[in-house]
Amino acid sequence: MFPYRLVFTLFVLAFVGYIAASFAFFEMPATAADAENCGFLPGEFVGTGQLTYERTEAWWVSFQRKSEFFTAFSIGLATAFAGFALSTARRTGSGAATGAALGGGVLAASAICVSCLAPVLGIVGLGFAGSLLAGVPKWLIALNTLLLTGWGTLYLHRRAGTCPVPPQTTHNAQPAS
Amino acid sequence: MNAFIRNIAFSTLLLMPLAPAGAADYNTVLQPAKPGLPLAHPIAKDDIAPPPFSLIADRPKNPAYVPGLPGLPQARPFKDDFGVPRPPKFDGVFIRQSRVENGEVVIPAGGLFYLEDTMGGEVALRGEVMPLLATTPTYIDYDMSIVVKENVAIPAGQSVVVGGTVYQYYATVGHETTANHALHVKTIAGTDWEWAFGSPVLSTSQPGWWNTRFTQLYNQGQAREVTPQKMVFDWISGVRMDRLLLADEKLFTGLAGAGDEWKSGNRTIRVAEVNAEAGTVRIQVIENGKVALERTLGPVKKELLIEDTAARRALVFEHGDLAGFLSPWPEPFKDGKANLKIYAKAFSLNYGADFARDPRFAVYPVGCPTGHNFGYMLVNKQEIRIKPGGTAEGPQNYFKIGVDRIEGDRVLAWHIEDRLGNRSVNLGGANVGNVDLVLGQGRVAGQAILKDVGRALLARTYQAAQNAPQAQATGAVQTAPAPAHTASLPSGLSAGLIGAIGILAIACGAVGFEVGRRKRAV
């Protein structure tokens, strides 16, 4: 039985959550270089913290120009996949589930690395991954995420249907005799 | 408040009667171009208000400068019917007296104008092209008049409008107990005649100047008081280009004999008779089988052409939207035929009248005292208000003024956009409180008006250039200028891109494997 509701709910939550976070953490660029990095044209930068747009409009312009909907889509998929993997842990084995969930997390993190959110948050350590993925178009990351999570879903779903494994916690709870 | 007082004074000046009844006959007072010649243009019977903000003090304040846009072209070359290159044509756009009010940009009536900004005079009867926004009609003929005003005072530093001419009392230069006083002469569009005639200098204490009576073709005046504080004229004259006659369609140009005819709709233009000896040709316009117009054109008075009104009138016919003339060049008659030019879709641009193709604008042709034309202005008749995010359209949507962002009384972002969708850079900024503009590189925008606004314009341009690198320098990273929205596009096969494509291939294989395995299981 495939947990459609769970997967769909997680996807929507992550998708919308990313958009909300993007809006919440959006900062008007302080320099012309920052403005260019956020997708603005040189002529649209007026001065420190000032653009030719109001903040809300500026965020939306940046979101569109930086193709952030692909990032939101990737994060939604990765999160939904991670949730699905954990939900099948009992039947597929905790190792496989954890590995798959971790894979989903890596996908989500890689999507964030090239998003506009990471620079604003100033997350340490994402710079290297971000620079590695900087030349990768977001649509390609989204497509890879779709295929990898799709493959992972097919794999876990097959394994869960053929080889149920009792949870390890049951054995650990047995008293020593 | 100053502008208000100035406008009242200006209106008062306009209300002053032209040459009142019983006054001097200015047909005899004014000097012709040469003794014995008639005045080339008639003396105006009525005054017609010039466009608002024609005074020097009303020039754009701290304006933005835009050299041009693809859809507002500069230095377009044209030739006349004789293959002679004409002065290049420039598109000009000007905004003056704009302000921010209640979160909106306000451009008052007369504050915005498009200028067909020619580098030199446009001459009638030569088949010269005169751009009219997106079209290129042919300039055929014109009506010009001489406006005379009496008892005109010009305080030092200020200006007055006489017809289409603007006089400014520019400076007094003292020397011991003597002095001379310079009067600058411009047009309502800002063309400075300094390059053509010079500025008349009046002086009662130094010889060699104009004393109190100056004559520069039909810009003439008789002063009764010249002091460092003001000049007072008994009378002063200027010229006004009352009408331009243009046509969108050429029906014929060349030699035509009796019986030749051309059709335009249900009208026929016919050469009824050619009399080369008398130097005349008789033209008929036939409508519904009846002769609706019969005109004898000629003879040619070459010694008075091109400027003399009567001499031109003798050569030109008009009937509805049909027009034509007996061309004096290269010769009016040859081999018993007349040298004719016939046009259809003719129309007029009348001084102060609505621009028929977009009545939101009034048209003001700009004349030179020689009788040459110096473009025309298309001036907004109604106040324009633009909210942030809004635009105001120029005549026939030839350009747009877009306001992007206002904060308090500052216009942080605005731009001009041509009809092709090309936008200027952001013309706003933290120190910009209006949308005053000078666009173009023509005789006015690129030269004459710079005397009045050039310093502020250069200072503003420098400030904008200075702010740009400073803003970049405050950032940790200097980036090469590039369209920002291309940053997410692949730029060659980087290691990351190769890896992503590899993952894509592996993922495709993995999905295929899983799908295949499921099919085998079924």
Image: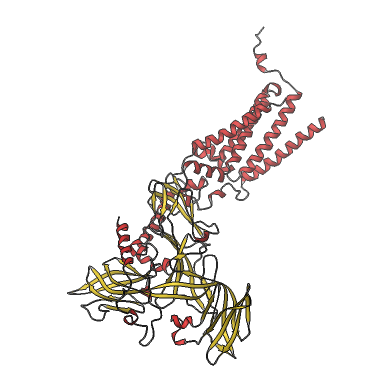
Count of residue discs = 0
Query: What color scheme is it?
Result: secondary structure
Can the viewer see residue B441 in this picture?
Answer: no
Q: Is residue B23 above or below residue B49?
A: below
> Observer-nearest residue: B341 or A125?
B341
- Residue at 56 percent across and 33 percent down: it is A17
Q: How far across and down, in percent of the image, does residue A93 sit?
A: 69, 23
Q: How far across and down, in percent of the image, does residue B227 sit?
A: 22, 71
Looking at the image, residue B419 sits to the left or right of residue B353; the answer is right
In the orientation shown, which residue stands out farthest toward the front?
Answer: B290
- Residue A150 placement: quadrant: top right
In the orientation shown, which residue stands out farthest toward the bottom?
Answer: B277
Can the viewer see residue B18 in this picture?
Answer: yes
> Observer-nearest residue: B436 or B187?
B187
- Residue at 45 percent across and 63 percent down: it is B362
- Residue A99 placement: quadrant: top right
Q: Is residue B57 above or below residue A24?
A: below
- Residue at 28 percent across and 66 percent down: it is B157
In the orientation shown, which residue stands out farthest toward the left?
Answer: B177
Q: How far across and down, in percent of the image, does residue A62 sit?
A: 53, 44
Which quadrant is home to the N terminus of chain B? bottom left
Which quadrant is home to the C terminus of chain B? top right
- Residue at 49 percent across and 83 percent down: it is B314
> Observer-nearest residue: A121 or B220?
B220
Looking at the image, residue B218 sits to the left or right of residue B363; the answer is left
